[in-house]
Amino acid sequence: EPEVTQTPSHQVTQMGQEVILRCVPISNHLYFYWYRQILGQKVEFLVSFYNNEISEKSEIFDDQFSVERPDGSNFTLKIRSTKLEDSAMYFCASSPTAENGYTFGSGTRLTVV
Amino acid sequence: GNSVTQMEGPVTLSEEAFLTINCTYTATGYPSLFWYVQYPGEGLQLLLKATKADDKGSNKGFEATYRKETTSFHLEKGSVQVSDSAVYFCALSESGYSTLTFGKGTMLLVSP
């Protein structure tokens, strides 16, 4: 069964450093998403991406965040200068249409120290 | 704005017990409703969904009915197994939009 692959599974970074979280969506999917879950809290929407541009973003997705699909297969989330409060599990997802048929990856646990 | 409220966990049950995980929602329109499951070390998987009032979603013995009058979408299973141990997330999306609003998740622990 096709999978969404996220790497790394766990990343530890120092406050103020840049991190890039990587995702390989399912190959024929057109819509891509990032969500995050701070420990003990809700899974929150960050951003959706379609046709090489952001289609929707939440208030969390400020200027410190960016997304890119650099080579037609990877879908990356960059945090420019990490803060302690960015520590969370980050989930990538993709879907073939705008209707809800998401496939989620297993997540990257980001720890900012 | 939209919100989803789930019962606090963990829910601890013995094998073959009946399961209910409560979920209520607040939405401005007529949302679609979902249950996702996360097994240890894995991603979120869609368990079931319902797109309009009185619809019943079902999968793997789990069921949930979209109740517009009580704004609820409670998850039920008649006889749980140890392999059902996971975290269960209730979620909604507004009609015509794909963004999901999740609840906090409820951990289910099933013992033999």
Image (cartoon, coloured by chain):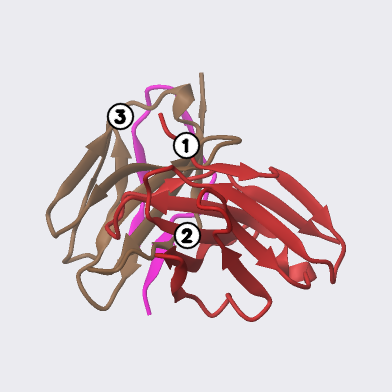
| SS type, badge 3 | loop
| SS type, badge 2 | strand
**What residue do we see at 87% from left, 63% from top?**
A14
How many C-alpha atoms fall within 10 Å of the one at disc 3: few (<14), some, or many (≥20)? few
Residue wearing tag 3:
B60
Q: Quick check: can you spot residue B72?
A: no
Q: Does the magenta stretch include residue B94?
A: no
Cα separation, mark 1 vs mark 2, equals: 14 Å
Residue wearing tag 2:
A33
Q: In this view, does B69 lie above or below B61?
A: below
At which x and y percent is residue A102? Answer: 38, 50
- Residue B8 appears left or right of A79: left
Look at the image and give the colour of chain A.
red
How many C-alpha atoms fall within 10 Å of the one at disc 1: few (<14), some, or many (≥20)? some
Cα separation, mark 3 vs mark 2, equals: 27 Å
Q: Is residue A79 above or below residue A9?
A: below
Looking at the picture, which amino acid does disc 3 mark? Lys
**What residue do we see at 40% from left, 64% from top?**
A50
The span shown in magenta is B1-24
- Residue A71 appears left or right of A112: left
Q: Quick check: can you spot residue A103?
A: yes
**What residue do we see at 68% from left, 76% from top?**
A64
Residue wearing tag 1:
A3
